[in-house]
Image (cartoon, coloured by chain):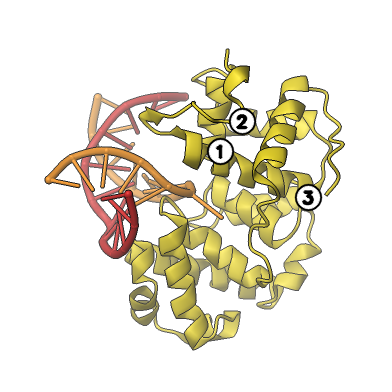
Chain colours: A yellow, B orange, C red
Amino acid sequence: MSLTVHSKNKKLKEIFERLYNFFGPQGWWPGSTSFEIAIGAILAQNTSWKNAEKAIENLKKKTLSPSEINKLPQKKLATLIKPAGYYNQKAKKIKEFVKFLYEFYEGKMENMKKEETERLREQLLSIKGIGKETADSILLYALEKPVFVVDAYTYRVTLRHGLISEDTDYEELKKLFEDNLEKDVKLFNEYHALLVRVGKEFCKKNKPICSGCPLEDMLP
DNA sequence: TGCCAGGCCGGGT
DNA sequence: ACCCGGCATGGC
């Protein structure tokens, strides 16, 4: 991907370039189907990616397609995704999502892609179990729409760097990135993934390890 | 051992 | 409009 990031905000530009040069491309969800990515987004809610991955592997053994999930009893589904935690809730959420997929898009992620982004976001948010982060993750990573995904790491890192205040909400933070960067799917994809990466390694909750962080000398 | 992880919902103030 | 408990497994 190009390293010439256009940004109205110098700090956002510099943070991205430093993270990208330090960690390299993160390449989230390589070679996965849109459907798999959407399910993965649900499974990863407040759960380590490792555990979500195990759940996905279990599903893939049985085949991971909308029609198969549709046929699978919720209880059975719950058992399969157990490693991801909150498995009863998540089984329900996955069922809800697939039901939605059939109801509006004939069970095909491809049909979803054709829908206009904002309308799609509203639809996703109306599904029980899909909140803002999961909706935006599906939009960006599964459907390749240029929306920025905000998560706990995005908040933590931007807060420590004085880009936002403590009471900045999801939509505001999302806008900060979307309004100041070129609306590029690849850029948003990598930027979010890089924020997660730096968050995991250098900006953990209650355990800030700034030493060695590529953004260390940018702290306020 | 307790805390944390790529949240969200529902009920109570 | 906030604030909080519940949901649950696996890793460090």
Where the C terminus of chain A falls, by quadrant? top right
At a point 76% along the width and 71% down the height, the residue shown is: A111
Q: Which mark is residue A198?
A: 1
Left or right, A147 with reference to A73: right
Contact, mark 1 vs mark 2 (Cβ under 8 Å):
yes
Earlier residue among tags 2 and 3: 3
Residue A132 percent location from the top left of the image: 56, 45
**Residue placed under numbered mark 2 in the picture:** A214
Residue A85 percent location from the top left of the image: 34, 61
At a point 51% along the width and 37% down the height, the residue shown is: A199
Please name the amino acid that badge 3 sits on.
Val
State the SS at label 2: loop
Earlier residue among tags 1 and 2: 1
Question: Is residue A168 among what the camera can see?
Answer: no
Residue A1 percent location from the top left of the image: 83, 49
- Number of numbered discs overlaid on the protein picture: 3
Label 3 Cα neighbours within 10 Å, binned few <14 / some 14-19 / many ≥20: some
At a point 78% along the width and 60% down the height, the residue shown is: A115
Distance between the Cα atoms at labels 1 and 3?
20 Å
**Disc 1 with disc 3 on a shared chain:** yes
Question: Relative to residue A151, is residue A80 depicted above or below?
Answer: below
**Residue placed under numbered mark 3 in the picture:** A185
Specify the subunit that label 1 lies on: A
Question: Is residue A69 among what the camera can see?
Answer: yes
Specify the subunit that label 2 lies on: A
Distance between the Cα atoms at labels 1 and 2?
8 Å
